[in-house]
Amino acid sequence: MPTPPDPFFTLGTRLPDRLGRTGTIHTPHGDIQTPAFIAVGTKATVKAVLPESMKDLGAQAVLANAYHLYLQPGPDIVDEAGGFGKFMNWDGPTFTDSGGFQVMSLGVGFKKVLAMEAVGVQSDDVIADGKQRLAHVDDDGVTFKSHLDGSPHRFTPEVSMQIQHQLGADIMFAFDELTTLLNTRGYQEQSVERTQAWAVRCIAEHEKLTAERAHRPYQALFGVVQGAQYEDLRRQAARGLESITGVSGRGFDGYGIGGALEKQNLGTIVRWVNEELPEHKPRHMLGISEPDDMFVAIENGADTFDCVNPSRVARNAAIYHPDGRFNINTARFRRDFTPIDDECDCYTCANYSRAYIHHLFKAKEMLASTLCTIHNERFTVRLVDRIRESIEGGYFDEYKAEMLGRFYGSKRSSTGA
Ligand SMILES: [Zn+2]
C-alpha cells in the first residue's frame, strides 16, 4: 500500500499575531514551497502554454478539473497514461478538484463564487436568467447533464473519488456541495451536514482505493470546508471534517476552503476556518488570484490557491502589471516598443514589445494568448513568491501596503492609462 510522505507538510515561518505562515508540502512529485499559487490546467493543459514554459516561469504545481477530464477524454484513458501529470508531460506536483463546483455551477448558472453578490431575496432555487437547471442535488449525490452533449450523468462522493484516483493527482479534494449566498440559512445548515456526510464517504472510498491501487504513489485527500458567510457553520464544518478519521486513523491530509463568500468577508471567513483547523495540515483556498485576495487569505492562514483568471484574462488581452491591470488591445500600444512590464523577468517581457503583442491580438494570432499567459502566470507566481519572502523576512505588512497601493492606487503613464 502506498505510504504518505512523512511529514506531508512542514511549517516554516509564522506571521506574528496572525495565522499566516510559510511551509513546504511534500508530494511524491516534489515539494511545494508555500504560500504558492497553483496554476490551473482545467483539461490537463494550461491553455496556450507548454508545460516547459510553466516550469520556466516558476509554477510549482498544476491543478486539473475532474469534471472536464471525466467527460473528455475519460478518466480510464488518463489512468492508462499514468495520471494527468504524465499525460500532459508535467512531472511536478499535481492537484485535481472534485468536480463538484462544475457539476453544480455549470448547470445552475452561478456566477464565479467570489464575484457573487448577495442581492435579491434569499432562495434555494437559484437559476440564472435564461438557463435551464441542469443539476439536481440529493443526499446521495448530484445528477447533471453534460455541458458538451446534454447526456445525463451522476456524481456521488464515491464516483468523484474513483475519478480522482484514476486522474492520479498528488492532492485531491473531497466531493462537497456548493451553495450560494442566496441560499437560505436553513439550506446552508442542511448543506454543511450533507458535505460532512459526503466527506465520511469520501474518506472511506479513498482508503479503499488507496489499498487497491498499491502500484501508484500516495494521493493526498483534502476535505472542503463550506458554511457560506456564517461563523458558526464555518467553524462547525471545519471541526466536523477534522473529526473524521476513517479506518486508518489518518483523516484528511489538508483542507480546501470553498463556497459562497463575499470579497469583503474573505479574510474573516478564512480566519474562522483556520482557527479551527490543525496547524500541521495545509489549507488551499479555492478560486482566488487577485492580489488583494491573496494577501488577505495568506495572512489569515491559507497556504495555496488556484484560479483560472491569470490565463483566462490573458487570452482577452488583459495584462497584470505592478501599476494595475491594463488591456494591450487598445490603440495606444501600436507603437509602444517597450516590454509589457519592464520590471518583469518572464520570457515574454525579455523578448517582445507591447507593439508586437498588440499586433498579434489585432491579427488574431494564437501566439498572443501564449505570450500574455506566460506573463500573467509569472506575475501571479512571483507575487506569491514575494509574499512568502516577506513573511520569512519579517516585512509582510510593508510589502502588502506597497504592492497593493501601487496595484490598485496608481495609474502611471507606463500603463498608458
Ligand atoms: Zn512578463
Image: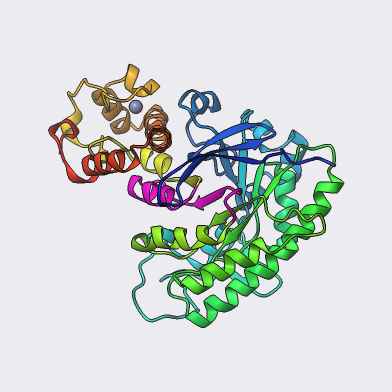
In the foreground, 131 or 307:
307
Can see residue 94?
A: yes
Tell me which segment is drawn in magenta: 278-302
Quadrant of the drawing holding the C terminus: top left
Q: Position of residue 38 (x, y in %)?
A: 51, 40
Q: Position of residue 74 (x, y in %)?
A: 70, 46
For this view, does 348 lie left or right of residue 217? left
For this view, does 353 lie left or right of residue 347? left
Q: Residue sitting at 47 percent across and 74 percent down?
A: 126
For this view, does 265 lie left or right of residue 336? right
Residue positioned most to the left = 413
In the foreground, 379 or 331:
379
Relative to 75, residue 239 above or below = below
Residue positioned most to the top = 351
Relative to 197, residue 221 above or below = above
Q: Residue sitting at 44 percent across and 62 percent down?
A: 269
Number of numbered discs overlaid on the protein picture: 0
Please identify the quarter of the rendering in which residue 236 is found: bottom right
The quarter of the rendering in which ligand 1 is drawn is: top left
Quadrant of the drawing holding the N terminus: top right
Relative to 267, residue 382 above or below = above
In the foreground, 82 or 368:
82
For this view, does 313 lie left or right of residue 243? left
Question: Would you say residue 14 sits in the magenta stretch?
Answer: no
Residue positioned most to the front = 17
In the foreground, 130 or 94:
94
